[in-house]
Image (cartoon, rainbow, N blue to C red):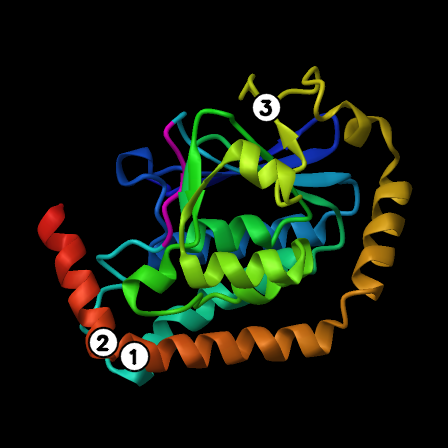
Amino acid sequence: MAESSLYIDPKQYAVITLNRPHKLNSISKNTIKELDNHLTEVTNRHDLKFLIITGNGEKAFCSGGDLNDFHGEMSEQEAYKTLKPMQEIIYKLATLHIPTIAWLNGLARGGGLELASACDFRFATPNADFGFIQGKLGIATGWGGGTLLYERINSNHAFQWMIESDIKTTSELLTIGFFQKEINDLTISENHEALKPYIDRSVEQMRHWKKQRLNFMELNLMKKRMEDEVRTCSKLWVSDEHKRAVKQFLSKK
């Protein structure tokens, strides 16, 4: 069974759905390959207005990397090789030629919030919570999402969230501007009030505005910073702090 899906709506938007609800829509190595294929297909189309990324079910948007693939017992080089492909997906998503929306249908943790940070906008259910928890695991963001978080919200808010690694509510994240809208109806359709402005605009308008946005993001520098994140996380991966944190987490499960 596919771990994700791509749907093209007649109203000229695409939806990528993470399809691992039994694993809180965590991302495996296979999921990464599928996401790369989906984004390539979206990139090659010239008739789309925007892209939505969401998770299957109402419990989780994405809980981060699957521990079966992103486990603690890796060398620094192995960690880099494991983390790098998803960093490339995150960059590809962040620089997509059309606007992107993270449709947070449930909780998000760690890498799940890095995925959300790669999108231009984030709409979230009020009945969930969210955390950049990497700090509590003895590591840092490993897919480039830390760099993108600084693009999305006030730098001090981003800095504090990384250090404290706490869990935040939808209301808190609306206040600091990380979320743009609260969605009570999780059904994605052309009739959803949150999507109406995006559907009503033309393809040419949407692509023009996304190009303007990207022109302000210094993409070469952003890419370098994201690469630095992967390398730093790879070094932290072999630390005793990370190994202890993973062992403690697994013992609780």
Residue 40 lies, in percent from the top left, at 61, 56
| Membership of 60 in magenta stretch | yes
- Mark 1 neighbour class, 10 Å CA radius: few under 14, some 14 to 19, many 20 or more: few
Instruction: Look at label 1 and name its amino acid.
Output: Glu
Q: Which residue is mark 1?
A: 78
Q: Which residue is more in the foreground, 13 or 253? A: 253
Q: Are marks 3 and 1 in contact (CB under 8 Å)?
A: no
CA–CA distance in space, label 2 to label 1: 6 Å
Q: Which residues are magenta?
A: 59-64
Could you tell me which secondary element the residue under label 3 belongs to?
loop
Q: Which residue is mark 3?
A: 183
Question: In the figure, is residue 140 to the left or right of 94?
Answer: left
CA–CA distance in space, label 3 to label 1: 39 Å
Question: In the figure, is residue 96 to the left or right of 133?
Answer: right
Residue in the image at 63% along x and 38% along y: 175
Residue in the image at 64% along x and 20% along y: 189
Number of labelled discs?
3
Instruction: Look at label 3 and name its amino acid.
Output: Ile
CA–CA distance in space, label 3 to label 2: 39 Å
Badge 3 or badge 1: first in the primary sequence:
1
Residue in the image at 89% along x and 50% along y: 208
Q: Is residue 228 visible?
A: yes
Q: Which residue is mark 2?
A: 74
Quarter containing the C terminus? top left
Quarter containing the N terminus? top left
Residue 194 location, quadrant: top right
Q: Is residue 52 visible?
A: no
Residue 22 lies, in percent from the top left, at 26, 35
Q: Which residue is more in the foreground, 225 or 38? A: 225
Residue 231 location, quadrant: bottom left
| Membership of 37 in magenta stretch | no
